[in-house]
Image (cartoon, rainbow, N blue to C red):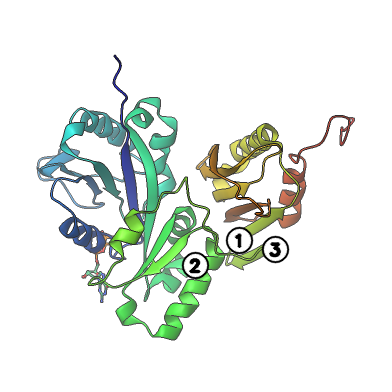
Amino acid sequence: MTTQLQTKPVTIITGFLGAGKTTFLNELLMAEKKGKYAIIENEFGKESIDGELVMEISDNIFEMSSGCLCCNLNEDLVDLLIDLSKKSGNFEELIIETTGIADPSSVALPFLIDPLVSRYYQLQRVICLVDARNIAHELATTEEARKQISFSDVLLISKTDLVTPEELATLQTLLKDINPFAVILSGTKEHFPHQEIMAYTRNQSEHYNGEEQTKEKHHHSLSSLTLTFDEPFDIPKLKHTLMVFMAVQSADIYRVKGIVYGFGETEKFVLQSVAEYLAIAPGKPWEDGEVKRSKIVLIGKNLKMKGFEQLLSHALYAAPGEGSESF
Ligand SMILES: Nc1nc2c(ncn2[C@@H]2O[C@H](COP(=O)(O)OP(=O)(O)OP(=O)(O)O)[C@@H](O)[C@H]2O)c(=O)[nH]1
């Protein structure tokens, strides 16, 4: 008899320097039963006393210093994940807290492309802590904060005690424009909505905050394009089109996410990009009477709406004999 290997759910916590990542994590650990989570913390700039890259600071809590998980420590992260999988009976879920300047897509990548890692783990959610008081300045002056917001599934606005309700509402609109697929929640260190956050799973979610129309939004050099299509896509063709595109232009794309209506399919397809990697997987079935429509959001630099509309239109389903092009 073969035993089915259970993958461990993984949560990545990101957010700019000082946004409240550790505070959120500590609150979560206090609210949950001891031993539920294994934790990997990446502290940038903190020297490890004995030069070790990975230190187990207490049971199942690991600290990786002397670098950043999204760059030079990425291979060490994979080694640690494999080591941890051997102790998989000791914990139920894994949480990774990144540094404040990390690109979370690089931290997420091993979970999606490394066959050994994805055998043991499944990336469930990426949470971004957003500092209510400082984020406007960080967005204006850094690239990292935007990448973190663009890539995350849940945006948790922290430090709401330090802003007015009007400032909070303005920030919520700004975040919705940057990443319309993210769930936006808010709280303070005393009241973070832990349960709601930890119940969210990125591959099942169809949450969409933006407008229904094809739209283009700009925030400095970053733009977010929302494209909607009523006609069904040819799923293999869409995958191919986007994969070729990502291979060429992934440096300017922070995130692609979509709910796709595929020709002849009874399920919605969920589209996710991570760095230059792209996944399209079936999600929940279309409900009876639900309007079948695709929504694809692209977030990145120098994106041109017209170009994307044309590019994606080529992947719409065409009946045999229809829409064939001659070169
Ligand atoms: N007023 C207020 N302060 C908060 C809140 N959440 C966190 N803080 C404070 O913000 C500071 C930074 O919090 P951390 O949890 O260390 O932030 P971090 O994102 O882990 O920081 P780095 O790891 O350095 O990037 C600490 O002094 C916290 O007490 C909040 O909701 N309200």
Q: Is residue 220 visible?
A: yes
In front: mark 2 or mark 1? 2
- Which quarter of the figure has residue 215? bottom right
Q: Which residue is under mark 3?
A: 213
Disc 1 crowd rating (10 Å Cα; few below 14, some 14-19, many 20+) is many
Compared across the picture, whether 208 is left or right of 120 comes to right
In the image, what residue occupies the spot 13% across and 49% down? 34
Furthest residue to the front? 288
Q: Is residue 142 visible?
A: no
Residue type (three-letter) at the residue carrying disc 2: Leu
**Quadrant including the N terminus:** top left
Q: Which residue is under mark 1?
A: 223
Closer to the N terminus: mark 2 or mark 1? 2
The answer to which of 230 and 127 lies nearer the viewer is 230
Could you tell me residue 132's position as x and y percent? 37, 74
Q: Secondary structure at mark 3?
A: loop
The answer to which of 285 and 295 lies nearer the viewer is 285
Q: Secondary structure at mark 1?
A: strand
Residue type (three-letter) at the residue carrying disc 1: Ser
Closer to the N terminus: mark 3 or mark 2? 2
Q: Which residue is under mark 2?
A: 175
Closer to the N terminus: mark 3 or mark 1? 3
In front: mark 3 or mark 2? 3
Compared across the picture, whether 276 is left or right of 236 comes to left
Is residue 11 depicted above or below 80 in this figure?
A: below
The answer to which of 264 and 116 lies nearer the viewer is 264
Is residue 191 depicted above or below 97 in this figure?
A: below
